[in-house]
Image: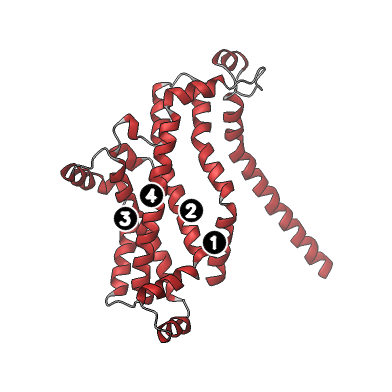
Amino acid sequence: MVPERKSKEAWVKTGYIGLLTLFLLIFLIPVVLIIINSFKDEAEFYARGVLSLPLKPSLDIFREVWQLVEFDVKLYNSLLISTAVALLGLLISVLNAFAIGIGKIKWGKFILAFFVFAMVIPHEALAYPLYYMMKMIGLYDTKLAVILILSVLQSAYGTYLLSSVFRTFPASIIEAAKIDGCNKWQILMIVVALNKPALSLLLVFYFIWTFNEFFLPLIFLVSNANQTIPLAVTLFQGQYTGYATMQSACSLLGILPCIVFFFLFQRTLTQGLVAGGLKG
């Protein structure tokens, strides 16, 4: 009976692995095709087809796309906005969550429900009011406008997440800190220090979400000098519709920063997810 059960479990496990491998291949095929075709020139692409390997791999297409898109400027804009939003959004989230989760402020649950409601509002519904407000205060078509808007919008999720984390923070540590004469700011520093994995995970999420944001930069960053990578890549693909290899190279350049960022902070993501799972 036991060998039969183990055999059945082995078959189920093999089936899961096979299914996951199939899904992985399905998702990887477009990426592989983009990589292959980005090293061809246009003549070779149309002569030999999409699936053929490049005869003479060249980086000329990448250089041309880099210059046409002004990729260095767009990368700087994306990194600046993403870093600023990640830091400012995390600061707002920590202060809000500390007040709700540990400070036990009056109407805390009602305020938290307000943040949850803010999470489900689509950005499209906020576009015109925010556009009008930024026009009125003179911040339209500036990177600061996108930084402020995304920091506030994304902090709603961070407030909700960290409130649940801080709510489970051991009360004995806070009481001991109060007995030792710590004020609220010092207690906040203790809470932050003991929740670094969750905060690091949230910081990485904020950065990635902001880096990939398209809609709000499309509305608020009109000037070419202020545009981010997702916006620049989309506009480039619209202008060069018939140039398949250039579009492939542009797409590859667009996703490359996120891939590099993921590998740099893979350990932080893993530690944050494990810590969140243990607390859950």
Residues at discs 2 and 4 in contact (Cβ within 8 Å): no
Is 177 displayed left or right of 222 in the figure? right
Label 2 – label 4 distance at C-alpha: 12 Å
Circle 1 residue: 272
Label 4 – label 3 distance at C-alpha: 12 Å
The residue tagged with tag 3: helix, strand or loop? helix
Give above or below for 258 relative to 266.
Answer: above
Q: Residue furthest left?
A: 136
Label 1 – label 2 distance at C-alpha: 10 Å
Nearest-to-viewer mark from 1 and 4: 4
The residue tagged with tag 2: helix, strand or loop? helix
Label 1 – label 4 distance at C-alpha: 21 Å
Residue type highlighted by circle 1: Gly
Question: Could you classify mark 3 by the number of other residues whose Cα lies within 10 Å: few (under 14), some (14-19), or many (20 or more)?
Answer: some
Percent position of residue 171, x then y: 45, 82
Give above or below for 248 relative to 9.
Answer: above
Instruction: Give the mark, 4 or 3, whose residue is nearer the N terminus.
Output: 4
Give above or below for 257 relative to 106.
Answer: above
Percent position of residue 80, x then y: 40, 43
- Quadrant position of the N terminus in the picture: bottom right
Circle 2 residue: 204
* Residue 12 placement: quadrant: bottom right
Percent position of residue 35, x then y: 59, 30
Residue type highlighted by circle 3: Val
Residue type highlighted by circle 2: Val
* Residue 107 placement: quadrant: bottom left
Circle 3 residue: 152
Circle 4 residue: 84
Q: Which colour scheme is used?
A: secondary structure
Instruction: Give the mark, 2 or 4, whose residue is nearer the N terminus.
Output: 4
